[in-house]
Amino acid sequence: MWVFLFGIVLKKFLVKYGAYNLFLYPEYLDRVGILSHLILGFGIGVFIMGYQISYYILFGRYFAFLATLRKPFLVFSLNNALIPLAFVLVYGLEMYDYQHHEQLMSSTAIFINLFGFLLGLSLSITITLTYFTQTNLNIERTKPKEKMSYRPIQSLLTRREKWYLNLPTNEWRVGTYLTPNFSIRAARGIEHYSKETIKLVFMQNHINATLFDIGLIIALLVFSFFRASEWFILPAAVNFLLLFSILLMFISAIYSWFKSWSVLIFFILFVGYDQLANRAGIRYENYAYGLPYDQKVPYSNAFLQGLTSDTVAVQEDVEREILILNRWKSSQEKEKPKLLIINVSGGGSRAALWAMSGFQKMDSVLDGKLMTKTHLISGSSGGLIGAAYYRALYRSSSSGGPVQPNDPMYREAISRDLLNPVAFDFSLNDWIFRLRGLTYAGYNYPQDRGYAFENQLNKNTYGFLKGKLSDYHNAEKNGQLPTMIFAPSIANDGRRMIISTRRMTFLTKRYALDRRKNTALIDAVDFHQLFQPIKRDSLRYLSVLRMNATFFYILPIVSLPTEPRIEVLDAGFRDNLGMLTTLAYARQFKNWIMENTSGVVIVRLVDHEYQTFVQEQPEKSFIESVRGPVAGLYQNYLNIQDFNQDLLLNQLNTELEGKTEVITIEIPKNETRRASLSWHLTNSEKKLIVESFSAPSNQKALQRLKTLME
């Protein structure tokens, strides 16, 4: 675990997901300051002492002379402090560097934070050492007559008499040791002490360690149960440290009991936990809030073939969509306006801030008319969250609310931290029984990190995203708001789940080109058509946004009420820019577009440079030659999407007789700095993202947009 912690602090592990943010910039009560650092330092101290306790359990018996000292655990910890001291030193240096260069904090503020960190660390270590020095036995506090009586029944139920029954024959020879007064002293011999007495000392010390471990478990359960109160939501790093401490001491306790049988015991415990977690009521499953899960709809290839063969539904949806397009056209100033479609890429908070900033910039360029000129918005993950937030602000503003969608405060709001509450729930709640629940739209659900994400997003955005998906139905139908289409990926088969405020079966219709099989390969499923038999109008809007942004492990994959159960995750796995949705929509209504518009303008808001870069291939080691092909495919899967979609874009342009223009607004590649792909942004990352709009290529793109839409 030390390697893992060093790796996080030094930005070697989980860098892509911004894990180091949790450890180098702790938040408590939505603020970063001396209090949050004090709590973090306390957590580091608990982990250090958990490490010392676990090693004392495992190896203390090899240093039998410790039992002859007044404070055996204190001496052991002091002489085993090299790694913890090195970690604290590296931690402090990395924290200063990170907060100074990434969070742009002053040296004074950083030193105050470091003081809080060291104070919390000292308090934690002092409290723990005081507990053990006051309660642990040693030779001086043990009388020779204290010999355990034989208890046959108790022996069947506990291993108390068997703990350290025999001191190890291969005791490690120690010549000198460091005392609590920081002086060097020779280790005394133990030949003149009773082995029973020494055994009793170590046994009682280990019982104290077990009580300490139980106390940590109780603390975690308390924080988990009362996490509805923000006072109990500790910095996420602290919860991980507490969890690591428990695991360390649990592993050491199991080993001290079962020795060579430990591997088998761990395997049995793992299988037992897995089987227990699969039982009804305990099984881990995440839900889309607002959907009933006591009803199931069938999901199979045959059933989906039947849905896509419903030509009546397709015709109804096409006719309704043409009416909506006509309403949109009637609100335009020109007889044949440009049909504006916006696609936003995924990428966590980075993409959310980029999309939000992009909408504000484009609206300013178009003199406040971006939303009236835009007909369709699609994309994935954080980008669509940013777009949805801007649309919600515009909806409130157009209804007379005191909202200015282009106010920088809303840009700041969408960039606020979402990682800490998610990591908090993951470390405290999701790995064990979910102790709390919630009620939404009359249905009961367990709370987990999915709900924590939605709750924090709602809080960050001042409640503008709360409500149901269906709340936007009338405004979209009347052409008052751009239509927004979500398309999360179905993990079971790779299809896309098309989610909008209305049924859109024309996006899922496929024709059987293989006359022999007479079946089509269906790549998308319409949400409203699939779940028509059940109540779906109460689906929470925040749940839709989360489904579209569910990167596995960070957020829980969402289950839907089907038989068999299907799970959905980030739309970016199939379509990072939402281009498949845009192209299918434009091709379906190409005749209407040719007759009623002067062409299509597609704006791509991309949170990275939209270009393919050739990676250098240095001489490979054997390991690199093995992992290289897989790593290359993983690193280039977005490029593969871009290649395929650009090919389809060219086909669309041909079908529309050259009346398609694409405008790309992107974050230019920076060789030294790039915002992390996570739900947390540093101040320097936020600055980098916003300043990217001043790049010459983006300024030209904005001017081109203005020219086309005039």
Image (spheres, helix red, strand yellow):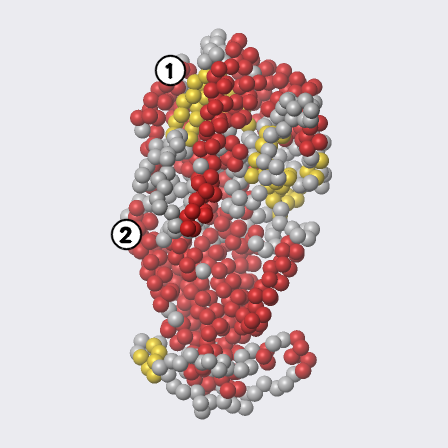
Q: Nearer the viewer, mark 1 or mark 2?
A: 1
Q: Does dot 1 land on a helix, a strand or a loop?
A: helix
Q: CA distance from mark 1 to mark 2?
A: 49 Å
* Sequence-first tag of 1 and 2: 2
| Above or below for 275 versus 298 | below
Q: Residue 231, position in %: x, y?
A: 49, 53
Q: Residue 108, position in %: x, y?
A: 28, 52
Left or right: where does residue 120 sit relative to residue 271? left
| Above or below for 26 versus 339 | below
Residue type of the residue flagged with mark 2: Thr
Identify residue for label 2: 108
For the N terminus, which image quadrant?
bottom left
Camera sees residue 708? yes
Q: Toward which corner of the image does residue 102 lie, by quadrant?
A: top left
For the C terminus, which image quadrant?
top left
What residue is at 36 percent from the left and 41 percent from the top?
Answer: 617
Residue type of the residue flagged with mark 1: Thr
Task: Using the image as rendered, state which of residue 262 and residue 199 is in the foreground.
Answer: 262
Left or right: where does residue 92 sit relative to residue 347? left
Q: Does dot 2 land on a helix, a strand or a loop?
A: helix
Disc marking residue 707: 1
Q: Count the marks.
A: 2
Disc marking residue 112: none
What residue is at 51 percent from the left and 67 percent from the top?
Answer: 249
